[in-house]
Amino acid sequence: MARKSVAETAQTRRRIIDVAAAAFKSNGIEATGVAEIMGAAALTHGGFYRHFGSKEELVAEACASSMEVLVEAAEVAAKKGNSALLKHLESFISTDYRSEYLGGCPLIAMGSELARADIHIRKAVSQGYQKLFDIIAKHGHTKNAKTAREDAMYALTLVVGAVTLARTMDDPDVSKQILNIAKKRFGETNTIAKPSSRSKAAQAAQVTAP
Amino acid sequence: MARKSVAETAQTRRRIIDVAAAAFKSNGIEATGVAEIMGAAALTHGGFYRHFGSKEELVAEACASSMEVLVEAAEVAAKKGNSALLKHLESFISTDYRSEYLGGCPLIAMGSELARADIHIRKAVSQGYQKLFDIIAKHGHTKNAKTAREDAMYALTLVVGAVTLARTMDDPDVSKQILNIAKKRFGETNTIAKPSSRSKAAQAAQVTAP
DNA sequence: TGTACATCAGTGAACGCGCGTTCACTGATGTAC
DNA sequence: TGTACATCAGTGAACGCGCGTTCACTGATGTAC
């Protein structure tokens, strides 16, 4: 092959990042090889270093890209109002999301690898989460700026914990129960302004139901 | 070297598991080699397969062992009463624990690798967590059996989420804040029986304090 | 606008390296008599 | 209790393999005049 145009080169770089983001989230960072990613992007592995200085650099870019997608999705939901934003966040606490690695959150899909990753990679994820905190704090249910940010952090803590736990449990019923409980409590915490919109009994029933 | 006695062989096996459990939690499963583990146990790598059929088998044993330690610690705390158990669980939501990989929980230390691990490994961790749910449900604050188990699951969801998020955040203040918020809410959720033991203002102040 | 040349995206072979696993060998332990 | 032999924990070299990275080469693209 020969030299490609500037536009084609940019497209190729974009394609590698997209493919990598999906692969890392699906199979983990260490388990995904550079050659594998390049192959999935319809290229041979030799050309990789025309686009990135190292595999770590690609990991950082892929994480940043994934977080941007999440941030944009949250912004879109937030513009539709705070109940749409809550519904959007709740949708992550689901069996669908638990089984779906491709479109998901880097922290949930490769959390323990990120905790040990270099500072650039962690920065990419951290900044994405800070943006999510801001969006949820600004467009969430409460107007008090201080507790709003706390509520936002708490909400994402719940999502991360519930999905991580649910993904590990071998019993599908237990897994589902963990998600249902987190979803229920999530709703309770984020609807203080309008309490008892559903009876306690109805909420309890939801937990053991599919 | 020559053949070892039955007692010595059992001791060696135990030593390999202990060393492996610490190493896996500290550096991750894939990043920890068999030779590295054997070296840390003062052995050469060749002898590994006298004790275990594969690396995966060792991972499962190491996870099971780590979970047993956590279950026993929870049982000890539970025997001292439910406030001691709550305090014990709260102690996991701390900057000390966030930075401490060695003595910790397999799910928090290597969560995303476990989600992709084989069924035997996930079973070991799952069963440990089920035991923790049982202990917390039995010795926690509430006597209602149904909501007790929900509360237990919810409590561990919070711990897992808070520590996972806190470990990834690059800003130490944000990291600490996430832990403080989770700790505060954890306390609130688990002290419904005796509400407002501390003022709302005091609780809010705690969040931004070290 | 046309020509000559430098640039560089992508190829595919090759690099050293560390991985999990195997194996022939050793000699003290455990066992059968 | 003593002797003869089979067992097997641990050693250290070796296996094939895939990893991240490098490199000489190609030819179309981009640039200088």
Image (cartoon, coloured by chain):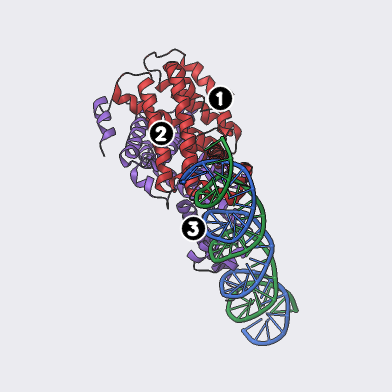
Chain colours: A red, B purple, C green, D blue
Kindly report which numbered mark, 1 or 2, lies closer to the viewer in this rendering: 2
10 Å neighbourhood of mark 2: few (<14), some, or many (≥20)?
many
Q: Is residue A69 left or right of residue B177?
A: right
Asked if marks 1 and 2 touch (Cβ < 8 Å), the reply is no
Q: Which mark is residue B18?
A: 3
User: Rounded to the nearest whole Å, what is the CA distance between mark 3 and mark 2?
Assistant: 35 Å
User: Rounded to the nearest whole Å, what is the CA distance between mark 1 and mark 3?
Assistant: 38 Å
Q: Which mark is residue A208?
A: 1
Task: Give the residue number, with chain letter if any, for mark 2.
Answer: A129
Kindly report which numbered mark, 3 or 2, lies closer to the viewer in this rendering: 2
User: Rounded to the nearest whole Å, what is the CA distance between mark 1 and mark 2?
Assistant: 31 Å
SS category of the residue bearing label 3: helix
Identified at 50% across, 66% down, the residue is: B39
Identified at 61% across, 41% down, the residue is: A41
SS category of the residue bearing label 1: helix
Front residue (pair A197, D14): D14
Asked if marks 1 and 3 touch (Cβ < 8 Å), the reply is no
Q: Considering only vertical position in the picture, is A36 above or below B147?
A: below
Front residue (pair B202, B108): B108
10 Å neighbourhood of mark 3: few (<14), some, or many (≥20)?
some
Give amino acid for label 3: Asp
Q: Chain of mark 1?
A: A
Question: Residue A51: x percent and y percent?
Answer: 51, 46
Q: Chain of mark 3?
A: B
Front residue (pair A150, A47): A47
